[in-house]
Amino acid sequence: MNLNKALIISLCILVFLALITVLLLHCTKKHLKKYQFEYAHANYEMLSTHVNCAPEIIRSYEKVKNVYGEKNKLIFRYVNNSCGSCINRYLIEILSLQEEIGKDYIWIFPAYPDDRSSRIQLSSELAKYNYRNIPADSLHIPIFIDEPKSYFAWLNNEGEIEMIFMPDINKPHYTRNFFLEVRRKIKMIDESPNKFNYKLR
Amino acid sequence: MNNQYLFLLFSFFLASCSNSNQQILMELSMDGECYSIDIDGEKDKHIPMSSYFKNVQTIILETNNDCLIGFIDELQVFDGFIYILDQRIAKNLYVFDHEGRFVRKIGSLGNGPGEYVRILDFTLDTKNRNIFLLDEMNRIYKYKFDGTYVHTITIEAPNSSTKYIQYYEGRLYASQNWWKKSDDNCMLLEIDPNNGEILSRLVSMKYNKNWDVSFTSVSGFFKSRVNSPPRYSRMFMDYIVNVGEEITPYIKLKSKHLTTEKDLENIGGKDGLPLDIQKLFSISKIFNIHCFVENEDYILFRCDGMQSSFVTTFNKKTEEVKLANNFNNDLIYNHDLQPWSGLFGFSDSKGVYEVLNTQYDFFNTFQNSIKNNEMIPNLDKLDQLKKLTSDSNPIIFFYEFK
């Protein structure tokens, strides 16, 4: 009798657990669908932003790529009146990446006026990075909807720009994904520097 | 037995909920000395600085790549060393000696241990030779005078940010700005410097016309910072108070033109909405005290308001008040038309320190004055001053009290 009771109770618990699991799965699927939609939508928004800005960035770099000759580098460019806490956040993430891949693969190109205050500020804020101040009038920061955009870009082994990325402080996972791609490129360079030669399509 | 456990549990619950350590001091204690300074009197054109100071010494700060300063935001002096905070450009704290030679930098920018994001203020524990740096993330970093990092504490005060700090007699006092209106908002938090625990909440916002949001101030709220006790005042307060276990009035300002709560509402400041500073200057009301310096005989400060600013001097012994549009810096200039004077940054018992930042128009005008022989001929280090450029570090003038 006691054994029957125990069996019945166990069966009830199992059925109950199964119901809970089905319910949870259903909610997760719903949430996932919603997330996928939002993700796709956000990706689309980001892409359209990049599509609008990218040609301007590329044209800007055409002017200076032969002057500075940076190759196989991750660059980060921002303007002095950008959101300070956002820039600080990005610099922290760049520092983490830098500790992993080495300082030589990263260059920071702020767009500050060429004056004493800027020189002091940048030497203090960017002491841990390779950097060079390029005022906006010599390497134009793209303006999109009247708003300067900071951006990352990868310079390939011919100094050509590719993989432009404009970070969003509210979407740090995009930046992480972008850095994953940077790591992949550097790994390929380290393993076989001449194997790949990416061209802009 | 079960009842005993329940009782213990209940007592424990009550104890954990209690907040008896955080007192709200609603009323300032009116006992003891409090100077009353009437700032409505007639104003002279100038007050000569030679009335209060016997000489001026020029401190030319060394300029090299290790100690480039863009702007001096805060300056304190102790034991022959000058502590200089450049908050907005270099974002570092530097130490120089009284000859202007660079000694060291305290901490550095970054996110590692002992590194800060942006320093807002600093304070000195002169007895134990510690420096406390306030970071904009509500963190306080403690260093020794020799620059050794000790530890970091965090101020856990939701819905607020700390703008200024002051160390006094084993306690840190933090001046707070609040993002949400509440009757519990207070001007000062008393903090344990060892662990960041909030010990007391001090001074009701009613003494500040209930203005508790962030607002640009021309100077920090703590004054006479190495005095015992230090003083405290913020915009729209009618008092300058003593900082310590008990907050007591030190100075009560008397004037028909002090800003009222109604004035703030009329110029858009109700419920913490953005206040138009142009409108503040357009009404004939006094709203801020700054450049506050004192010794055992005198108190000197500037008032903002009445559509400009004016200077006030107060004799502690005779309680005589003198008001003027400006100081006449007859210790530096040989004429009345001076571009800048009396923007004092710090005082101790020996004298007062004034900063001339080299990046701005004041400095250009100063250099023109040198070229035009408008300085007194025996001004300290005049030859070196002639060679300075806008690339040089700021200059400090030390006025020795009579």
Image: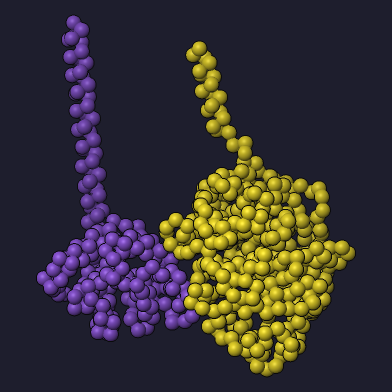
Q: Nearer the viewer, residue A175 or A15?
A: A175
- Regarding residue B204, the answer to whether it shows in the image is no
- Above or below B373: residue B129: above
Q: Which of A95 and A58 is in front in this view?
A: A95
State the purple chain. A
State the yellow chain. B
Farthest residue, direction top: A1
Farthest residue, direction bottom: B372
Q: Which residue is drawn at 55% across and 82% down?
A: B392
Quarter occupied by the C terminus of chain B: bottom right
Q: Residue at x 72, y 85 (%)?
A: B379
x, y percentage for residue B322? 82, 71
Q: Residue at x 69, y 72 (%)?
A: B353
- Regarding residue A19, the answer to whether it shows in the image is yes
> Would residue A30 be found to the left or right of residue B401 on screen?
left
x, y percentage for residue B261? 68, 57
Farthest residue, direction left: A195
Q: Residue at x 46, y 64 (%)?
A: B109
Q: Nearer the viewer, residue A128 or B183?
A: A128
Q: How many labels does the image show?
A: 0
Q: How is the image coloured?
A: by chain
- Above or below A35: residue A148: below
x, y percentage for residue B38? 81, 64
Q: Nearer the viewer, residue B73 or B145?
A: B145
> Would residue A96 be found to the left or right of residue B207 on screen?
left
* Image quadrant assignment for residue A11: top left
> Would residue A50 be found to the left or right of residue B37 on screen?
left
x, y percentage for residue B24? 65, 43
* Image quadrant assignment for residue B100: bottom right
